[in-house]
Image (cartoon, rainbow, N blue to C red):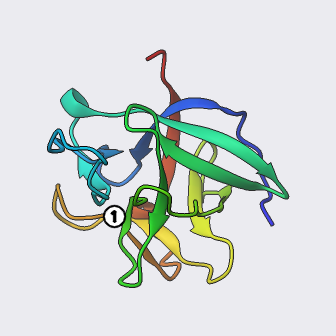
Amino acid sequence: MSDTSIPPGKYYLVNVASGSYAGVGPVPPIYPPFPSPLKAVGHVIKEPFTLEPKGEGKYIITHKALRLPVVYDDEGIVRLARQGQKATEWVIVRGYRPDRYRIKTDKDDLYWTVGEQNWDPIKVEAENNDSSQEWRFEEAQW
């Protein structure tokens, strides 16, 4: 269960360690959309996500433009869901400093983690007490 609450709405998800934004980057214009992995992307191509509370501190995180929920696969890669795939309910907990948060699975306690290189996929990994697992939520007016 979460120890914090983020209001529902549209947000840019900013990684504290890298200053990069969570996003998919350029996606081929096909339908249904490809289940692209989330990556650390720059400010120029940042993309908003919606947070929808589901109760008990859980949230559905959805890519605003593509309208696909964010899930993770068997390899631990955080990605957009395939068309019709069930959404993951994510838990948002406090980070290590004020105004920072961590996004984790509700079952395995695995946290969104940014890789060392830009464009590396975001993965779910065990807690590492590092800012690579901390996120800020910037309100998006988009």
Q: Residue at x 68, y 52 (%)?
A: 59
| Quarter of the picture holding the C terminus | top left
Q: Residue at x 38, y 31 (%)?
A: 65
| Residue 74 sits in quarter | bottom left
Q: Residue 93: image x %, image y %?
A: 68, 59
Name the amino acid type tagged 1: Ile
Q: Residue 64: image x %, image y %?
A: 45, 33
| Quarter of the picture holding the N terminus | bottom right
Q: Residue at x 17, y 38 (%)?
A: 29
Tell me: residue 51, above or below residue 90.
above
Of 41 and 100, nearer the camera is: 41
Of 67 and 136, nearer the camera is: 67
Q: Residue at x 27, y 57 (%)?
A: 36
| Residue 44 sits in quarter | top left
Q: Is residue 58 left or right of residue 61?
A: right
Q: Mark 1 sits on what residue?
A: 122
